């Protein structure tokens, strides 16, 4: 799971990053909200954690802007604002959850996991004779378990999350390989690995653009 944290408090941001990473959550932390768009372009996220009181822009405005732009990633508001009016404003603007500072980091982790799980239609995806269990990280075909590499699994997970959409090669590279310098040919190799186990024509290629899981 990859989480984007938008928080300008350096002490809180650092402690959250450390805690979440200890619990197997990959964290991209933006402390300068002017760099948020850059972070969004560079990668795909399972959950966005957004503070409201930032240095350069109000979190409420960022929330509204993200939803206007069509960002569907679950957004958890993390703030010291505890009035019901503040919560109502954020939920009406498209927030998925709201946690008030100070909080127990374990509660934040539980909320993140719940949002990530809720974002999937089902933990089990069936494509003809192939069943994919996102929770257990297993793939079975005709009742027999199939092993794939961790990289191929991450690619498959991304395509499932964006099922029915064309996922650009750039988005795949940023999500699966993050800051590693790899090219389009590597993506094609792992797409080929997935095609060996999935039914024919499950993954469509859009030359020069990306791929779509039907």
Image (tube, rainbow, N blue to C red):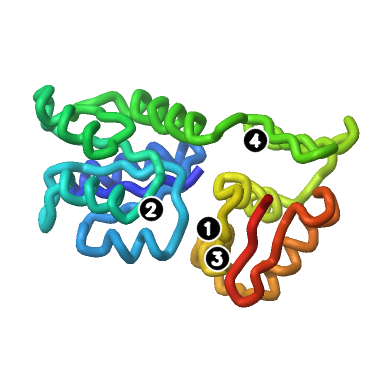
Task: State the CA–CA distance, disc 2 to disc 4.
Answer: 22 Å
User: What label does residue 28 carry, if any?
Assistant: 2
The residue singled out by tag 3 in the image is 168
Q: Is residue 148 left or right of residue 78?
A: right
> Do the numbered discs 2 and 3 sit on residues whose CB atoms are within 8 Å?
no
Task: State the CA–CA distance, disc 2 to disc 1.
Answer: 12 Å
Task: State the CA–CA distance, disc 4 to disc 3.
Answer: 22 Å
Q: Earlier in the sequence, mark 3 or mark 1?
A: 3
Task: State the CA–CA distance, disc 3 to disc 1.
Answer: 11 Å
Looking at the image, which is closer to me, 61 or 1?
61
Marks 3 and 1: which is nearer the front? Answer: 3
Q: Position of residue 35 (x, y in %)?
A: 26, 64
Q: Position of residue 203 (x, y in %)?
A: 72, 57
Task: State the CA–CA distance, disc 2 to disc 3.
Answer: 21 Å
Q: In terms of secondary structure, where does tag 1 sit?
A: helix
The residue singled out by tag 1 in the image is 175
Q: Position of residue 82 (x, y in %)?
A: 12, 25
Q: Earlier in the sequence, mark 2 or mark 3?
A: 2
Q: What residue appears at the point 76 percent right and 40 percent down from the top-left corner?
A: 127
Q: Earlier in the sequence, mark 1 or mark 4?
A: 4
Q: In terms of secondary structure, where does tag 3 sit?
A: strand
Residue 174 in view of the camera: yes
Q: Earlier in the sequence, mark 4 or mark 3?
A: 4
Neighbor class of circle 1 (other Cα within 10 Å; few <14, some 14-19, many 20+) is some
The residue singled out by tag 4 in the image is 134
Q: Position of residue 19 (x, y in %)?
A: 38, 37
> Do the numbered discs 3 and 1 sit on residues whose CB atoms are within 8 Å?
no
């Amino acid at each position: 799971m990859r989480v984007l944290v938008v928080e300008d408090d350096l002490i809180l941001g650092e402690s959250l990053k450390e805690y979440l990473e200890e619990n197997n959550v990959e964290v991209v932390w933006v402390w300068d909200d002017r760099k948020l768009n850059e972070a969004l372009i560079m990668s795909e996220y399972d959950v966005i954690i957004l503070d409201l009181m930032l240095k350069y822009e109000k979190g409420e405005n960022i929330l509204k802007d993200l939803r206007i732009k069509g960002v569907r990633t679950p957004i958890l508001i993390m703030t010291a604002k505890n009035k019901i009016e503040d919560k109502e404003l954020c939920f009406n603007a498209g927030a998925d959850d709201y946690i008030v500072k100070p909080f127990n980091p374990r509660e934040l982790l539980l909320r993140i996991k719940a949002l990530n799980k809720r974002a999937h239609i089902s933990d089990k995806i069936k494509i003809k004779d192939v069943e994919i269990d996102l929770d257990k990280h297993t793939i079975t075909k005709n009742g027999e378990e199939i092993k794939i590499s961790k990289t191929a699994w991450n690619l498959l997970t991304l395509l499932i999350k964006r099922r029915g959409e064309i996922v650009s090669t750039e988005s795949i590279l940023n999500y699966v390989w993050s800051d590693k310098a790899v090219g389009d040919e590597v993506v094609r190799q792992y797409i080929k690995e997935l095609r060996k186990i999935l039914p024919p024509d499950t993954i469509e290629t859009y030359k020069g653009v990306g791929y779509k899981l039907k």
